[in-house]
């Protein structure tokens, strides 16, 4: 029988369903602790962490801890991880800054869930080095280039979704810094600048408006709350939400994806829209496999699942959404972020001008 403290939503997911989904992720985890997208698939730090967070929620905290240990032992000297690894072999040596910021979210989530201060202390050097690496790609105005290549050169463009996720990562990293007694005032300044540019400078980011992630990520990452967040969600709801099925990945193709749907659920929960959030989580359950895993997406124009795989990170997003809506674990509010540091606000006209946005 699953533990009584596992998330459950009446009529949508039972505690035993969550336990089974956690086990479906653990079944893909490699002996090293790495969690690939699916058996034989590649590993990236972001999706690895999302899966680890879900395993911990599903009662598999020890397996999740192994996943973080894999990050700790594979981190490169500059604080980054390769963008893509398969069976221990680096397939893409570049570093995605969003991917490198996300371990802070996972580590803080694990600390909230377990209360394990020894774990926090052990993981702190990893998180500190990762965040310091990410901030090497921050521009003067506040946006952060999405990648740094194998030679250390920033990509030259910033992405709204990635910077929104980094915003959340910085808040979690600062919370962890407070927990271990190592204040990081420089991070507070960087976070404030990033929040400012996310809230007021859409021109700072490469145009990606066809992707649903660019729509809801400023809310999911905590940069927008209150009326601005509610207005942003309302503006493009009809472009991305398909009644009874979930949310589209892109606005011009007839498919819904489980992870984007559940991230939207988390975004809605963060602004108090629990009703629509629960409806969306229920709607995407058509992607659930009997073994508890979740298919990545569904092409509703021809009734086919696409791609033909169950992905660990999709299952992870489902578990995290269920925890948020059910208010079950001690970490259920990590995406609401009400207790996370906000950074140092940009005030008094301190925002830099456009000539500071390019790199020499």
Image (cartoon, grey):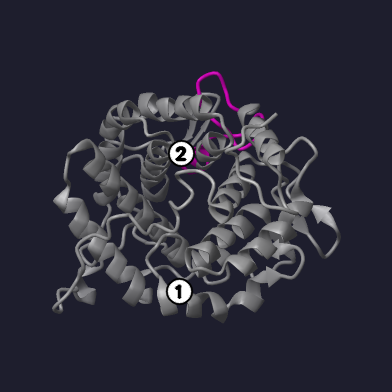
Q: Nearer the viewer, residue 333 or 98?
A: 333
Q: Nearer the viewer, residue 60 or 106?
A: 60
Camera sees residue 68? yes
Q: Is residue 32 magenta?
A: yes
What residue occupies the far top of the structure in this picture? 31
Near mark 1 (Cα within 10 A), the count class, few <14, some 14-19 or many ≥20, is: many
The rendered magenta stretch, by its main secondary structure, is classed as: loop
Quarter holding the N terminus is top right
Q: Which residue sits at x=26%, y=48%? A: 174
**Percent x, y for residue 65?**
45, 27
Q: Which residue is mark 2?
A: 45
Image position of 338 with respect to 312: above or below: below
Q: Which residues are magenta?
A: 29-49
Quarter holding the C terminus is bottom left
Do residues under tags 1 and 2 come within 8 Å of each other at their CB atoms? no
Residue 317 relative to residue 156: left or right: right
What residue occupies the far front of the structure in this picture? 4
Camera sees residue 247? no
Q: Which residue sits at x=71%, y=53%? A: 10
Task: Give the SS element for disc 2.
Answer: helix
**Percent x, y for residue 21?**
67, 37
**Percent x, y for residue 24?**
68, 32
Tell me where residue 237 sits by quadrant: bottom right
Residue 229's disc is 1
């Amino acid at each position: 029988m699953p533990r009584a403290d596992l998330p459950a939503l009446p009529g949508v997911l039972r505690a035993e369903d969550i336990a089974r989904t956690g086990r479906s992720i653990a079944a893909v985890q490699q002996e090293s602790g790495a969690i690939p997208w699916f058996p034989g698939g590649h590993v990236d730090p972001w999706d690895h962490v999302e899966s680890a967070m879900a395993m911990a929620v599903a009662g598999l905290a020890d397996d999740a801890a192994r996943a973080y240990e894999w990050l700790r032992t594979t981190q490169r000297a500059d604080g980054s991880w390769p963008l893509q690894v398969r069976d221990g072999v680096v397939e893409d040596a570049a570093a995605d800054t969003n991917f490198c910021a996300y371990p802070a979210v996972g580590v803080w989530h694990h600390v909230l869930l377990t209360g394990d201060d020894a774990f926090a202390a052990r993981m702190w050097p990893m998180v500190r080095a990762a965040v310091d690496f990410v901030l090497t790609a921050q521009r003067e105005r506040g946006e952060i280039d999405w990648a740094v290549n194998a030679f250390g050169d920033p990509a030259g463009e910033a992405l709204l979704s990635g910077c929104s996720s980094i915003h959340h990562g910085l808040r979690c990293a600062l919370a962890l810094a407070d927990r271990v007694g190592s204040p990081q005032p420089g991070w507070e300044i960087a976070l404030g600048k990033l929040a400012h540019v996310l809230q007021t400078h859409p021109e700072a980011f490469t145009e990606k408006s066809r992707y649903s992630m660019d729509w809801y990520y400023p809310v999911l990452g905590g940069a927008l709350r209150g009326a601005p967040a509610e207005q942003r969600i309302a503006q493009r709801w009809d472009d991305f939400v398909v009644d009874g099925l979930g949310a589209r990945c892109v606005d011009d193709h007839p498919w819904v994806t489980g992870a984007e749907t559940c991230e939207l659920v988390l975004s809605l929960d963060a602004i108090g829209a629990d009703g629509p959030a629960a409806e969306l989580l229920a709607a995407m359950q058509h992607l659930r496999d009997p073994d508890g895993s979740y298919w990545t997406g569904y092409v509703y124009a021809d009734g086919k699942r696409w791609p033909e795989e169950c992905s660990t990170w999709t299952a992870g997003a489902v578990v995290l959404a269920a925890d948020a809506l059910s208010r079950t674990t001690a970490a259920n509010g990590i995406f609401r972020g009400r207790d996370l540091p906000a950074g140092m606000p940009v005030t008094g006209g301190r925002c830099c001008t456009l000539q500071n946005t390019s790199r020499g």
